[in-house]
Amino acid sequence: MHRNWSKWFAAAGLRAVRTFAQMVVSMITVGQVFSEINWIQVLSVSAVAAIYSLAMSLTGLPEIGEENILLKKPEPEEDSTPIEDDLEYHIDREEIE
């Protein structure tokens, strides 16, 4: 798989920054006093989410026209026969015997 790494780093980095920001906002509850927020926990959970986002970006980024390799269907082998043909063959042999 050929990948344009500069475009990938830009798109994956932007996605990771957005994920980080979303986690920061989601960890701050409504009505919580600003000084009572456990910032170490908020930042560490957000950092892990950003790292996870980068790891998931390795499978493909639609922003730069990459297909997700986890969703790609495997291509059939050229010399393999479909299952339906095999079943018909076995059914025909049973009728003959």
Image (cartoon, rainbow, N blue to C red):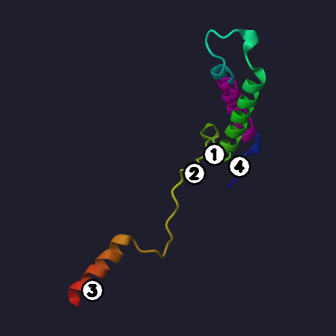
Q: Which label's residue is closer to the chain start, 2 or 4? A: 4
> Which residue is tagged 4?
3
Of badges 1 and 2, nearer the viewer stands: 2
- Residue at 37% x, 71% y is 83
Dot 1 and dot 2 residues touching (CB under 8 Å): yes
Residue 37 sits above or below residue 95 on the image: above
Q: Earlier in the sequence, mark 1 or mark 2?
A: 1
Q: Amino acid at mark 2?
A: Leu
What is the magenta segment's predominant secondary structure? helix
| Residue 30 sits in quarter | top right
Q: Residue under label 3, please give it.
A: 93
- Dot 4 or dot 3: first in sequence order is 4
Range of residues picked out in magenta:
7-23
29 or 17, nearer to the observer: 29
Give residue 43's position: percent from left, percent from top: 75, 26
Determine crowd level at label 2: few under 14, some 14-19, many 20+ residues with C-alpha closer than 10 A.
few
